[in-house]
Amino acid sequence: MRVLITGGGGFIGGYLIAGLRERHEIFALVQKRPWGTEERQVCWFEQDLTQPLDEARLPKKVDAIIHLAQSRYYRQFPDHSWDMYQVNIGSTLSLLEYGRKIGIRKFIYASSGGIYGYGYERFIETSAINPANFYLATKYCSELLLGNYNAYFKTVVFRFFFVYGLKQQGMLIPRLIHNIRNGDPIVIFGKEGIRINPIHITDATRVFGPSLETEVTGVFNIAGDEVISIKGLSELIGNFLGKTPKFVYEKSHLQGDLIGDNSRMKTVLGVIPERSLRMGICEMV
């Protein structure tokens, strides 16, 4: 298949391209081409997604679009709300229209499990949506846009829950590793902090193969099997580092946990997590 991937220079994008390029013809849309990307199997396009999509430079025919790109300023509201809006919503609409005009068969969108908010039970794909911030609201807005294009091509939404792995920067697990290694305190809300079920990048990217190569559609939670609290996760990291984490406890303002039910990922996509949390954390440390 001919597949256009946005965010090809990002964490998930890098792993995904490496996994798909042997079986598919890949077109990677990036803001700036990463160093050392000389693979013949990949055709690179530079595009600032805050600007109008330059369709004239893009391929005239692709079978599928995988939209991974998101604003780099996802934590900087309201100072960079316009960038978040343009990249997270505006570019989604532009790509949907581009896909409609060139006759794609499938559009796959990378969303976030965070759009559910917090709860005391595992979230299933039909659970109520309660985005906690502007960034998560933009992700959900793009999900709603996708629904309007089901008449033109098949759509898939992946709601990722705390993807982690080697080369990741700035996200939860790399930040915990950095703090514990340097002896910096970790803030814990309540007794243990929220509970989550992270998924390793090698398992997370396996969902794209069956979603491309079958007629599957709809929304999928992409999450691991193991549930752990922020405190428990910190202590696991500390064991591998040989350091005892320093905790600062604060009164919890969060009502519940953020745990995704991954049953549909397993039964429909046939993807069962293989990399244990212990193995994945050991690899990163």
Image: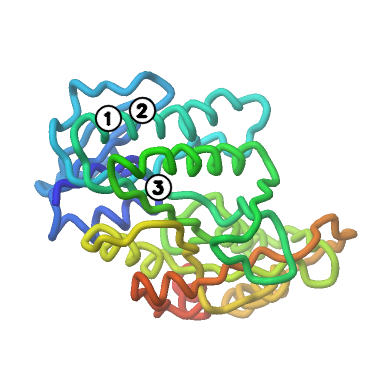
Measured as percent of width and height from the top left, residue 21 is found at 17, 55
- Amino acid on which disc 1 is placed: Tyr
Please provide percent x and percent y for residue 56: 19, 21
Q: Which mark is residue 94?
A: 2
Secondary structure of the residue carrying numbered label 2: helix
Q: Is residue 281 above or below residue 220?
A: below
Q: Residue at x 31, y 35 (%)?
A: 30
Q: What is the three-letter code of the residue carrying label 3?
A: Tyr
Residue farthest to the right, as pictured: 251
Q: Is residue 240 left or right of residue 117?
A: left
Mark 1, residue position: 98
Question: Mark 2: few, some, or many residues within 10 Å (few <14, many ≥20)?
Answer: some
- What is the spatial separation of the Cα atoms under label 1 and label 2, in whole angstroms? 6 Å
Q: Residue at 21% across / 58% down in the picture?
A: 20
Q: Which mark is residue 109?
A: 3
Query: Mark 1 Cα within 10 Å, few/some/many (few <14, many 20+)?
Result: some
Mark 3, secondary structure of its residue: strand
Q: Is residue 75 depicted above or below 260 in this figure? A: above
Dot 3 or dot 1: first in sequence order is: 1
Residue 70 in picture, x, y percent from top left = 46, 39
Q: Tell me which amino acid carries mark 2.
A: Ser
Task: Count every numbered label the image shows and give the total.
Answer: 3
Give neighbour class at mark 3: few <14, some 14-19, many 20+ (Cα, 10 Å): many
On screen, residue 158 above or below 100? below
Label 1–label 2 contact, CB within 8 A: yes
Up the image or down, 81 lies above or below 135; here it is above
Give me the C-alpha separation between circle 3 and circle 2. Answer: 13 Å
